[in-house]
Every structure is written in structure tokens, then in C-alpha cells.
Amino acid sequence: MRTNYLILLFVATLSFSAGAQKYITKTGYVKLFSAASLEKIEASNRQVNSVLDGATGDFVFKVLLKSFEFEKALMQEHFNENYVESDKFPNSVFIGKVTNIKDVNLMKDGVYDVVVDGKLTMHGVTNPVKTKGTFEVKQGKVLGKAKFTLTLADYKISIPGAVVNNISKTVDITVDVTLDKAN
Amino acid sequence: MKTWMKILLGLFVVGLIAGFLVYKFVYNKQHPDYENVAPSVTINAQDLYRAFKDNKDAASHLYNGKMIAITGKLGKIEAVDTLVTAVFVFNQGMFGDEGIRCTMLKKLNDAARKLQPDGEVRIKGYCTGYNETDVILEKCSIVNQ
């Protein structure tokens, strides 16, 4: 519930930033990948809401966890029921900032290195996340890409004892969003 | 063949069959054939959106993870790469149109592209929740009325 208030506060701040150019998408892409001895775990999600304030660098993305699609139906069930408990915690939210937004010329096509720093909430736990990525400015759009690694234990996601030695304790996250100028 | 050998052989065969069945129907079970899954809820599109907007937790409990058929006036069809989304619009927010977003099954993308905005349609899909702006239905198909 606290996370929802933070998002509302964030959105309100974005809405009232004088002259701020906002970039948004509702079809961002997030992939998770984990390689382990038992088998690799891979899932993708195309239902990612994301917004960037071009003036301040404020950046948020929100993911519906039930929208992660796995190749194996059983894996998808286990992910939702046993790991992220998506009935109880349906969303994962990142609220942060592109700390070097001043280095990005949103009016000029090109690829810019960015640093994103913020907090990720998942499974009811919030942790700081800092990662490097790129913004490609292309014909008025911003194509944002970043990769980072999460440790499951940091989010109180426990691995069942029977498979604890066969499942990786970390997950690689790939974020790929194409942000359009908001009207 | 001695009796104990027959028993051992029998147990081995039973174990083999059980292992195969567990692999096929549990470990390697297929995703549902979403187009042919009967909806467990049929509801007016605006009522579904309103339910989430008014009380997200209660609506999530009722609808998340279920195949839902909705009927309403289609707002628009969006296409990004191979992702075709039928959108029912009920509100305006900072993300623009807000309502229900129905991501179509890939094999039905062409049929979805032919849907007419402002026309009355019935679409069913697997509800994955509400993200503060939209209710999301996935693996959607058009239901013939």
C-alpha cells in the first residue's frame, strides 16, 4: 500500500513539473534469466508501464508479475505461487532517477550512457538498485536498455529445500523500453 | 523367470510409466489452449474496469488469474511489433487512455487488426491484474456473439 502512495506521489510530481517533457510506454519489455544446474529459467513480460521525466531524470517502471510468460507452464505456476506470490504481491515497481540526465540530449539522435539509481520493490521488500544502461534517442523516442542482477534472498524469495542446490540464487534482469513523448 | 524377477520387472515398468506420465503431464505440461478455454467470468468491460478502479484488492482477488470475457465498445487497436492490443478506453490519465488492454494471441493478430473502433465486441482473455492505469487481459481471443 505504501508503494502505491509513493507511485501516486511520484506521478503527481511528474505531472506538475513545469515544462517537463514526459516520455511514456505501456508496452515495455522485461526479461528475467537464471542459469542453474537443473535448467535455465527464462521469462519475458511485455506489460511494463514506464515513465521518464526528461527534465529531472525521474524514472519509474511497473511490472505485473502474472504477465511473465515462461516456456513451461509448471515453471510459470511455481514462479507465481511459490516464489513471487503474485496473488499477494501482484506488482513489482522501480522508482528512481537517471542521475546523469543532463548528459542526455533528448533533442538529438544518438546513444547515451546513463546511470539509473533507485529502489525496486518486489515481494513486499524494497531494496536499492543502481545500474548502468543506455538511452538511444531516435526520432523523438527514447529507447532505454539496462541489465542488472537481483539476489532472491534480498527480496525474501525463498527456494524450496528440495531444489535449493539446483536453482540459481540470483536472477539477471533485462529492461528494454521504447518511450514515446507524452501528449 | 523366477517370481521375484517378475515382480522387479513389473515394478520397473510401472516406475517407467509413472515417470513418463509425471514428465508429460506435470513437469512438461503445456500451457492451456487459451482460445478454447471457457471464461469463468463474463462481464461488461466498463464494470470490470470500475471494479478494479474502485477497489483494486477486492477485484484482484475476484478476477486475477481467471479467463474473463468482456463486452463493450472498442476504443482502438494498437500494434507494436508482433504485439497487438485491443484497448477499451474509460478514462484519461498521464499515460493517456486508460481502461482495459487486451493483448491478443499472436495467431489472431490479423483478425484483431480488422476490428472496428467504436464497434461492440466481446473479447476473452487471461486477467493478469491492474497496474494503476489499466486492467490487463492477455492471450486474448475474439468471442463470436
Image (cartoon, grey):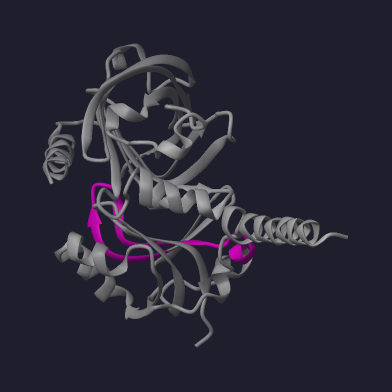
Q: Dividing the image into 4 quarters, which one contains the C terminus of chain A?
A: top left
Q: Is residue A15 left or right of residue B60?
A: left
> A108 or B66, which is in the foreground?
B66
Residue located at (16% from left, 40% from top): A3
Q: Main secondary structure of the magenta part?
A: strand
Q: Position of residue B27 (x, y in %)?
A: 58, 53
In the rendered structure, does residue B92 fall within the stretch colored magenta? Answer: yes
Q: Is residue A136 visible?
A: yes
Q: Is residue B96 magenta?
A: yes
**Percent x, y for residue A21?**
27, 32
Q: What is the residue that sits farthest to the right in this orientation?
A: B1
Q: Is residue B70 left or right of residue B48?
A: right
Q: Residue furthest bottom?
A: B145
**Do we see residue A22 in this rendering?**
no
Looking at the rendered structure, the number of numbered marks drawn on it comes to: 0
Q: In which quadrant of the rendered view does residue B129 lie?
A: bottom left
Which quarter of the picture shows residue A56?
A: top left
Left or right: B134, with A164 as reference point: left
- Decide if residue B33 is on the left or right side of residue B12: left
Q: Nearer the viewer, residue B41 or A150?
A: A150
In the rendered image, the vertical position of residue A112 relative to residue A121, given as above or below: above
Q: Is residue B77 above or below residue A126?
A: below
Q: Which residue is painted at 28% across and 72% down in the image? A: B48
Q: Which of the 4 image quarters holds residue A39?
A: top right
Q: Position of residue A127 (x, y in %)?
A: 24, 26
Query: Residue B101's spot in the image, x, y percent?
Result: 39, 61
The residue located at (29%, 46%) in the rendering is A91
* Residue closest to the eye, B38 or A112: B38
Q: Report the span colored magenta.
A: B87-109
